[in-house]
Image (cartoon, coloured by chain):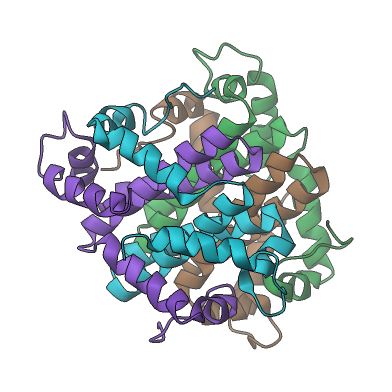
Chain colours: A purple, B cyan, C green, D brown
Amino acid sequence: MADTLERLAQIIELRKEADPATSYVAHLFGKGRDHILKKLGEEAIETVIAAKSGEREQIIYETADLWFHTLVMLAHSGLHPQDVLEELERRFGTSGIEEKAARSGGGSASPPRQ
Amino acid sequence: MADTLERLAQIIELRKEADPATSYVAHLFGKGRDHILKKLGEEAIETVIAAKSGEREQIIYETADLWFHTLVMLAHSGLHPQDVLEELERRFGTSGIEEKAARSGGGSASPPRQ
Amino acid sequence: MADTLERLAQIIELRKEADPATSYVAHLFGKGRDHILKKLGEEAIETVIAAKSGEREQIIYETADLWFHTLVMLAHSGLHPQDVLEELERRFGTSGIEEKAARSGGGSASPPRQ
Amino acid sequence: MADTLERLAQIIELRKEADPATSYVAHLFGKGRDHILKKLGEEAIETVIAAKSGEREQIIYETADLWFHTLVMLAHSGLHPQDVLEELERRFGTSGIEEKAARSGGGSASPPRQ
């Protein structure tokens, strides 16, 4: 269970050059960044709707879709889930997540963004 | 690194009853489900905008925010990251993620939703 | 041009009971509220992506999709575009839109919501 | 009522160069495109959540916010609400909206995109 995200990232790396007719990952990469981002956004909306309904199975299913498409977006951006997990470690490992997130809705980063 | 999500979920469980004045998690729980879902949706939008810009640091930061607020939503729904990771394992462990996800954009679940 | 939204709302009213096989509006109503909301959210994401790209034709097209699906949502909720336009009139007719919108990102209404 | 959107667009044009300290429109323009798009996306999420709740006043309020921020986005992109209304006229004036929208969820434009 522990390294599910990493193994999933490896599968995405392996399949992104596959035949789009048989691989959904290759299909997404073939469509390009805007399509991947559209799917990521759609899955977020579906997760919100599922969570608003409060149906457990649907929440799990839609969140899995959301995380999966997030991993595809990371792969397409040349990033790995570890990059995100390290950022989370950095925040809450020093108990800093609370303060940082509290600032204007998780607004600014360290080092400062933009 | 491996169990970052699980440890983060534990921290969320510990803090959800804390003082909203000092804990962002408690603040979110105090605001209730709609506020948590609004934040989840906002972070998804910000992730999409960051990924469209292609700025690595910003993508990592916004994705961390997105995953964090997803974990808060799961906790608020009485769910754990393992539930989602098991769903992902179930899909790609049997190589089934490709077929399932390909069906109308990750549309139907197993057992079938709706 | 002036009453495009109202005429479109009338068309939606007329078609919502039509054959879903030939009418997209009837198709949406047949699928139900969650599907309509999912479409509304998707079109918002596509509008954001189009605007981020800065391509005029695409922005116009996606915004038209967004407004159309907003009208379908309003019809499904028993509301009319006039209800929304009157709210906008109420705000900026008294120059109040600035103050209200400025409060925490357009957060609270007058009379107060929630 | 008829030309509410156009008058609102004029107000936005007038205020976009105003003092960000007193004008919310000027504040948004000062923050730039990504901030405007973030707000547009947030208001879409809030509209979805309100419509899912089924509370009429909240739906009206959030849809007004969504349309307002769409108008700000259009102004920031050098576009006018007429551009969008003409696109809608073009579609349903020739009864074309049904067919076009039905194609893969309102996917392709005329002239065809992508």
Q: Say which residue appears at 37% left-offset and 60% top-offset.
A: B3
Q: Quadrant of residue D107?
A: top left
Looking at the image, residue C27 lies above or below residue B106: above
Q: Quadrant of residue A84?
A: bottom left
Q: Is residue D73 visible?
A: no
Looking at the image, residue B105 lies above or below residue D44: above
Residue A37 falls left or right of residue D19: left
Residue D82 falls left or right of residue B56: right
Q: Say which residue appears at 64% left-offset and 31% top-offset.
A: C33
Which quarter of the image is occupied by the N terminus of chain B? Answer: bottom left
Looking at the image, residue D49 lies above or below residue C89: above
Q: Position of residue D69 (x, y in %)?
A: 60, 62
Which quarter of the image is occupied by the C terminus of chain B? Answer: top right
Q: Position of residue C59 (x, y in %)?
A: 43, 53
Residue D96 falls left or right of residue B12: left
- Total marks shown come to 0
Q: Is residue A26 visible?
A: yes
Q: Nearer the viewer, residue D89 or C62?
A: C62
Q: Position of residue D25 (x, y in %)?
A: 63, 75
* Residue found farthest to the right: C111
Q: Position of residue C47 (x, y in %)?
A: 46, 52
